[in-house]
Amino acid sequence: MKFVRVRNDQGEIYQSYDVIWKLINWSFESCELDEVDPMSSEVYIFVIDNGNVKACCERPHKARYIHWNIEIPADGQNGCRKYFDETWFSCKYCFNFSKGKKKFVILGGDERLIKEPEEKKWDFCHLAYIYGKRAEQIAQLEAQGFTMAPVGFDEIKDQSVAQSRWGLCLHQHTVPALSPQRMTLFACRKLPIVIEGCDPYPYQVVKLQDFDKTKDYAEIAKENFKLFTEIYKFKQEVERACAS
């Protein structure tokens, strides 16, 4: 089994997939896209799908090609691509909506994702691109007096999560899909998760419409932490999915 490193036009790994690539690098082998051997018996897992991946996977092959689709879909978009042999989803909505050979796979955590919380400077940490629907919702929350942690990668992301009271997950489009990378990171960092209405399985969450700023929701954070550092571990969830 190998995960395939797919790069952008600048030759870099997509930054928005930084959490899952940390988990991959800790537990599994990986290879470059041009190192994929289509006539081998290898299992290749792609977490990015772009034109180069499509060109690779459409060619005749004996290897098993899996697309782990953790991307938030546009409205009405089927998440299963015909040029993959199988598609994994870590969001129940996307799994149920999409048609094709598919499997629900939990994006598990890892103890190496753990970083202890710090003194709180911000109310919410959302780690998301701000535009359209999200921008309107964030503006509404800020108008109510809530503060938002900075958005960024590496040290900025670590500090934003560590110094926030709650992890906030807002839908990018009108579809009720969740972002499993964000959710698993929040779980491993002991951050209570506040989310718009959707099927959050297996995460324990507070729905945004039920959110009460006078509560700290520490028990929810504690439960998620246990789930994603002891029960749903990344390596074992991937191995289980490949074996079934």
Image (cartoon, grey):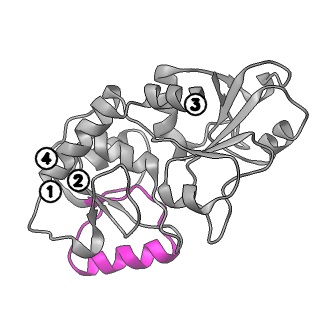
Q: Residue furthest left?
A: 214
Q: Amino acid at mark 1?
A: Tyr
The reply to whether dot 2 and dot 1 touch (C-beta < 8 Å) is: yes
- The region drawn magenta spans 124-150
- Relative depth, front residue between 85 and 131: 85
User: Quick one: label 2 or label 1, which is nearer the N terminus?
Assistant: 2
Q: Amino acid at mark 4?
A: Glu
Q: Amino acid at mark 2?
A: Pro
The reply to whether dot 1 and dot 3 touch (C-beta < 8 Å) is: no
Which numbered mark, 4 or 3, is in the foreground of this view?
3
Disc number for residue 119: 4
Marks 4/3: CA–CA distance: 44 Å
Residue 116 in the figure: left or right of residue 195: left
Mark 3 crowdedness (10 Å alpha carbons): few <14, some 14-19, many ≥20: few
Which numbered mark, 4 or 2, is in the foreground of this view?
2
Q: Which residue is mark 3?
A: 244
Q: Residue furthest front?
A: 244
Q: Secondary structure at mark 4?
A: loop
Q: Residue 130: within the magenta?
A: yes
Mark 4 crowdedness (10 Å alpha carbons): few <14, some 14-19, many ≥20: few
